[in-house]
Amino acid sequence: MTEVVRHPDQADSSVPSRLQWERYAVRRGDRWRDIWIGRLIKTIAVSTIAAIVLIFLFIGREAAPVLTSAEVHQEVTVAKMVVPLASRPGQPNAFIWQPVSDTPKYSLLPLLLGTLKATLIAILFAAPFAVGAAIYSSEFAPPRIREVIKPVIEMLAGIPSVVMGFFALMVLASVLKDSFGWKFRLNATNAGIALGVAIIPVIYTVAEGALRAVPRHLREAAQALGATPWETARRVILPAAAPGIFAGVALGLGRAVGETMIVLLASGNAAIWSADLTDSIRTMSATIAAELAEVVNGSAHYHVLFFIGALLFLITFLVNSLGELYIGRLRRRLTGVAG
Amino acid sequence: MTHVSTDSAIISDLSPTDAGGVSLAAPILSGRKSRLLRKLSLLPILTGILTLCVVLMLVIILWNIVAGGIGGLTWEFLTANPTEGMTKGGIFPAIFGTVFLVILMTIFAIPVGVATAIFLRYYAKPDSRMARLVRVAVNNLAGVPSIVFGLFGLGFFVQFVGRGIDKAFYGGGLAFGQPAIIWASLTLAVLTLPVVIVTTEEAMRAIPRDYIEASYALGATRWQTIWRVVIPNSLSGILTGGILAVSRGAGEVAPIMFTGAAYYLPYLPAKLNDQFMELGYHVYVLSTQSPDVEKTLPLLYSTVLVLLLLTFALNALAVLIRMRLRMRYAG
Amino acid sequence: MKRIIAAILGTALVGVLAFAGKPITIKGSDTMVILGQRWAEDYMKTHPGTTIQVTRGGSGTGIAAPINGSADIAEASRPMKDKEKQEVKAKRGADVVEIPTALDGIAIYVNEKNPITKITTAQLKSIYQADTKKWTALGGPNAEIVLYSRENNSGTYTYFKEHILKEEDFSVECQTLPGTAAIINAVAKDPNGIGYGGIGYSKGVRVLSVAASDSSGYVEPTEASVASGQYPLARYLYWYCAGAPTGDTKQLVNWVLGDAGQRVVADVGYYPLPKKTGMPEQKAK
């Protein structure tokens, strides 16, 4: 054992000091341990990549029969998920979600529409409050108040979604019904508002971070030119931080699309194909939550639910990527790398 | 709060506020606004009102739950089993199940999360392909909907790993190939991993460089430096990450509904392949499946309150630790 | 710190190793889970050596559970289909044993403010298929009917679909809620709502009398009318085992069918079996 022990990570050593390890007198045992632990840490870090790949693979594996299995195709095909289906005699064809039936019907469109409605309302509700609060706390609030606002909004984020769903089911739905007299007590707007409250902290945090990241000299320059806080905010800060605010909204959107317990409890879960925002809705996530525990493993219904999960995964992936894109843009804008 | 920390980390790299070379031209300001308008400018008022509304939302929700739940919050409620078809008694098994679940979860999530943070900070070159891939994976993991984690837990842990164990060690009998606390906690561990990674990395970023250089100068190896300098100095950050993960995990229902949570169990979970009762799931069950809605409503409110107090207490703890951490390096 | 970690790991390890006595697992119908839980509670009080684990899920799970091999007893609020019995036989290699354990009436609920007190099955069908859209058709107020239904995996859903809708589909406007309690809660808060579910739940809402046809009389769901079959929406609640129950499970089944078990049935709000039923008929269709 006279060979020189070389550090395996020497090539990509990124330790801040950038020291050459080998020059130091280190006991060989320590050095070996260092190498093995380095490998272990690397392996573990790689496992996070593995996690996302496994999620993709295993959802895909259970969803694939919807595309490939002849047995599943006897009940459902992708084509049948998007065309109007015959219901009962004398009724026009329609988009119907009736997985437990003599002829099971798996129209995805009402579920997509339901998810869209809830998400839309959530964003329309949350964005003004979240962005407003972000502007206020980053631009106008006295430091002492700012110190209060942040934890308060973080507390809002700390409310578990099942609690938010419970609140929407018991309290918010009654308040809305009593004030507006909608036909459905549990509906898209009810669920959407509860979702909106849940995503305010997401949008707020990202937007506030972006606003605060706007370089101080921009602010000072505007003020030196005699701009009021309003002018500074509107003409300088907001345009500079805009991509960050969009990113916040996109991440909030991603969260709203996939949120489950709130919509399961508060939306009524009727898969209605309509444009009315006060109709009951059935979202993709709630459908999985309500039906998966009960289906027979390996049945067409089971695979369809995984298929919906795969779609959900894909949609949130795209929306979150959009958020990342904006953050990249913000970073470039603020650091001027590729301005 | 937990996801907030992940989100905020996305932009925390931006924090050196005076990065130069900004290409923005500040528009020339018009001086035509009346003096009054300047003084009373609308935006602070408008945004102030919006902020107040957000605070009010929180207050309304909390007030409602506290008012409904405080009456039933007795020592007996916290320590007794549910009885008479859940219309009476307490929620002890749900509290116990939640605690057991999150402890198991942290056993998986913290080592992996901390190791990944160490890798990102001290092993990988910041712009290497590997580091970027890991970062992309972590960011994406943070964005995966919780219900998809539930599907993953069922498809991977229960059906694939669990069945595999059963086939290998139990002759195909049923031991691990069914929903169980181990699978639920593993699912939650994957879900909360980003929180741990982001918080830990943030703490490691705050460690002064001198410490690390001093360690190397004394001839310590990389691992010795990490073990003796980095980890002790980021311990409170790791703790914060763990607490935030626990607070997130304790509130999640969707990932555990197919992977291990049970409606009612007469005994406490003792083995890794037992099912368990859990607070969030108990709230869901009581609000949809209780046998007597009127009788269970007070119990339901109290359960919600307990869940809320638990997550808030954990979050507050995390905030406190963080403040201490900040003060240590700032002071 | 290290000591704490060691302690936690130690506990977990002990946990893995401690494979103690196997509990009896009961899985299934949401309607029956209350009953199952009360049975379990009472049985364990008098039989300290046995543990019983009751988990929820619609009857879909209850019936799927023995198919998947994850429960000793499956509870269901609908009879198992022949196809499902064959699947169990193929997977578990034993005939399914069907044990009726209690009687239940499916109650039709409306809000307490609703003046309607009775309904025919034909009217129900028309309402749940959204052919009848207003309460005026039944002599009620001029308001739209809001439909509440159970999730499609529940036995109650299947029963209703079979006996009221004659296997046709529900209207898409039906709000499907994840539990009977959720339906009760919704109907109690919605003056125009109508819902259905097990009779054991019906508190805080009005229960309608039901007539099988226009000519037959309206019958209120009571123990007598359900047991005699006069009430048109009556059903058995079943336990299923793969193969004849043995050991602890057999004792439990006997206890449930005996006086003590049937007293629990009445306590929970369902109806005891007529006296003669006794031990399970060990027939496999």
Image: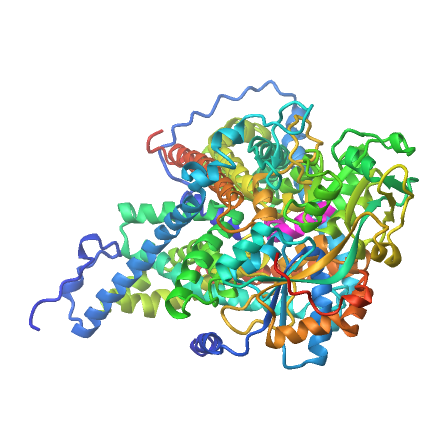
Q: Is residue A152 magenta?
A: yes
User: Which percent across, then down, holds residue A236?
Assistant: 50, 29
Residue B116 as seen in the image, left or right of residue B257: left
Name the magenta segment's main secondary structure: helix
User: Which percent across, then down, holds residue A76?
Assistant: 51, 35
State the residue in front, C224 or B241. Answer: C224
State the residue in front, A208 or B153. Answer: B153
The figure's colour scheme reads rainbow
User: Which percent across, then down, holds residue B234?
Assistant: 41, 63
Residue A126 as seen in the image, left or right of residue B156: right
- Give the extent of the magenta segment: A148-169
Q: Residue at x 64, y 73 (%)?
A: C250
Q: Is residue C117 above or below residue A274?
A: below
Determine which quarter of the picture holds residue B193. Answer: bottom left
Q: Is residue B75 visible?
A: no
Q: Residue at x 78, y 33 (%)?
A: C126
Q: Is residue B52 above or below residue B39?
A: below
State the residue in front, C238 or A180. Answer: C238
Q: Is residue C157 visible?
A: yes
